[in-house]
Amino acid sequence: MREREGELLAANRAFYVAFRNRDLTALEGLWSRQHPVAVIHPGWPPVFGREAVMESWRQIVGGSGAPEIECGAVNILALGEPACVICVEHLAGGDLIATNLFTREDEGWKLIHHQAGPMPPQIAMQPPEPLH
Amino acid sequence: MREREGELLAANRAFYVAFRNRDLTALEGLWSRQHPVAVIHPGWPPVFGREAVMESWRQIVGGSGAPEIECGAVNILALGEPACVICVEHLAGGDLIATNLFTREDEGWKLIHHQAGPMPPQIAMQPPEPLH
């Protein structure tokens, strides 16, 4: 179970490394070729099917505005088939919150779905009221 | 497989009926008690754990602004454990796009995760150019 979790977290990290590096070849390898796939980018309609999903990534990582993205607050919600990872995406313009679904294939965990959407700004910690 | 699909679609429909009817008791029954659960409402930070998830539903369906929601364009992406349904949520203020995850329990499919986020307005269908 721990090994399976570790491999899942590694696949999730690899996804964000590929995203940040605009590495389309890595993204192609990380997305499933054996299962139906979908992606919901923020403000996009849903995209279904490997060809359309990879085209959406080409548009996103190919543009000059490809985001400097960092992943945090990673949480494995389900470790089944598929497995579900929920994490925060830190971007210059603010945070997004993402659901990533992975399924297990011969080569390891592969992405079958990603939905990211806007997250409210973190509420700044207020210093406690002075007692007197 | 067909029966399993039909039951999954029925559970997804039941979720939106309960949502529209502000039926908290039905929502309590539709969400898993046996697995970790999470929810990402539009513009909210992620909510983890049954107690917090149900409290979020109490806030949403308990308010006077509870949405008149209709579900459409339903697509089963994965029929595993969990299963993944992607659908459009039609609301007065515009459409949302949702990922719903269900897991199979003794009583049937139960929700373990829901993420909804904004979707761009539908592009109006253009009539074809006249041929001459």
Image (cartoon, coloured by chain):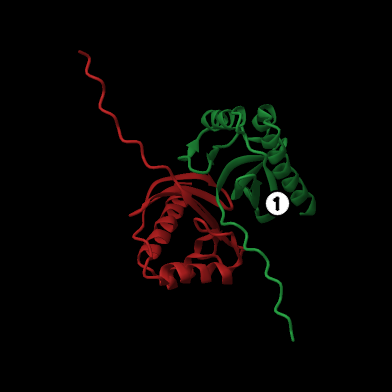
Chain colours: A red, B green
In the displayed structure, B44 sits above or below B29; it is below
Residue B23 at least partly seen: yes
Tell me where residue B15 appears, x and y as whole percent. 68, 39
Query: In the current view of this chain or complex, which residue is farthest to the front?
Result: B132
Report which quarter residue A17 is drawn in.
Answer: bottom left
Query: Which residue is pictured at 48% across the width and 65% down the height?
Result: A30
Say which residue label 1 marks. B72
Q: Describe the element under mark 1 as helix, strand or loop.
A: strand
Figure check: A9 above or below A66: above
Q: How many marks?
A: 1
Label 1 packing within 10 angstroms: few (<14), some (14-19), many (20+): some
Q: Chain of mark 1?
A: B
Q: Residue at x 63, y 38 (%)?
A: B67
The residue lying at 64 percent from left, 48 percent from top is B89
User: Is residue A77 found left or right of B124 in the rendered image?
Assistant: left
Q: Quadrant of the C terminus of chain A?
A: top left
